[in-house]
Structure formats: C-alpha cells, structure tokens
C-alpha cells in the first residue's frame, strides 16, 4: 500500500476545504436565486391565460423546486465545514 507524504495529505485536505467552500457559496447563491424565482413563477401561474400555459409554468416550478432542493442539500452537506473555518481561531489554525 502506497502512502502519501504528510505534506501531500495536508495539501489534499486544504483542497477539500476550498472545494467545500466553493460548492457551498455556489449552492447558497443558487438557493437564493430559486427563492426569488419562485415569486415570478407563482405570478405567472396566477395570470396564465389558459390551462396549457399554467401547466407549462407548473412544470417550470417543479423543476425550480427540484433544483433548489439539490442545491440546499449541498449547502447542508458543506455548512458545518464552512462555518467551522469561518470562526477566527479555526481560520488562524488553517492559515498556519
């Protein structure tokens, strides 16, 4: 079994932390965007001219909610790591 050097393992860990932070921020922004989009879709359903148009909007709404859920799951998965390293004392340790 091949072992990586401690420096390589530390580099992998730091890359993992960076990846978690990037995923968290992107997913968090996507969740917020879908929250704003929800109101537009609800208005579009409210003012739909006919059943066909309402069904198209409902499909978009369903897709939006699924996309939001996927991103919210990413936020939840990475939140503890991101919040841990947002604390000053933990960030200082990481920076050393």
Image (cartoon, grey):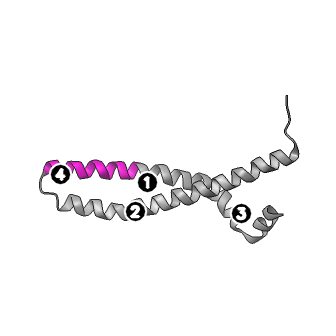
Q: On the image, numbered disc 1 is attached to which residue?
A: 68
Image-based side of 79 in relation to 92, left or right: left
Q: On the image, numbered disc 2 is attached to which residue?
A: 35
Q: CA distance from mark 4 to mark 2?
A: 22 Å
Q: Mark 4 or mark 2: which comes first in sequence?
A: 2
| Disc 3: CA contacts within 10 A as few (<14), some (14-19) or many (>=20) | some
Q: On the image, numbered disc 3 is attached to which residue?
A: 85
Q: Closest to the observer: 80 or 29?
A: 29
Local SS, label 4: helix
Q: Closest to the observer: 31 or 18?
A: 18
Local SS, label 1: helix
| Disc 2: CA contacts within 10 A as few (<14), some (14-19) or many (>=20) | some
Split into 4 quadrants, where in the image is the C terminus? bottom right
Q: Where residue 57 sits: x, y (%)?
A: 24, 52
Image marks 3 and 1: residues in contact by CB distance under 8 Å = no
Q: CA distance from mark 2 to mark 1?
A: 8 Å
Q: CA distance from mark 2 to mark 3?
A: 27 Å
Image marks 4 and 3: residues in contact by CB distance under 8 Å = no
Q: Is residue 62 magenta?
A: yes
Q: Mark 4 or mark 3: which comes first in sequence?
A: 4
Q: Which mark is residue 21?
A: none
Image marks 2 and 1: residues in contact by CB distance under 8 Å = yes
Q: Mark 2 or mark 1: which comes first in sequence?
A: 2
What residue is rendered at 16% in x and 58% in y? 48
Image-based side of 27 in relation to 11, left or right: left
What residue is rendered at 31% in x and 53% in y? 61
Q: Closest to the observer: 8 or 47?
A: 8
Q: Residue furthest top?
A: 1
Q: CA distance from mark 4 to mark 1?
A: 22 Å
Q: Mark 3 or mark 1: which comes first in sequence?
A: 1
Q: Which mark is residue 53?
A: 4
Q: Where residue 94 sits: x, y (%)?
A: 79, 61
């Amino acid at each position: 079994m091949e072992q990586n050097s401690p420096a390589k393992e530390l580099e992998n860990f730091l890359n993992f932390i960076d990846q978690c932070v990037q995923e968290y921020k992107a997913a968090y922004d996507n969740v917020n965007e879908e929250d704003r989009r929800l109101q537009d879709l609800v208005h579009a359903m409210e003012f739909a001219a006919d059943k066909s148009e309402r069904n198209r909007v409902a499909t978009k709404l369903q897709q939006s909610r699924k996309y939001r859920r996927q991103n919210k799951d990413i936020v939840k998965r990475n939140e503890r790591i991101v919040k841990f390293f947002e604390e000053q004392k933990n960030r200082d340790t990481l920076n050393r």
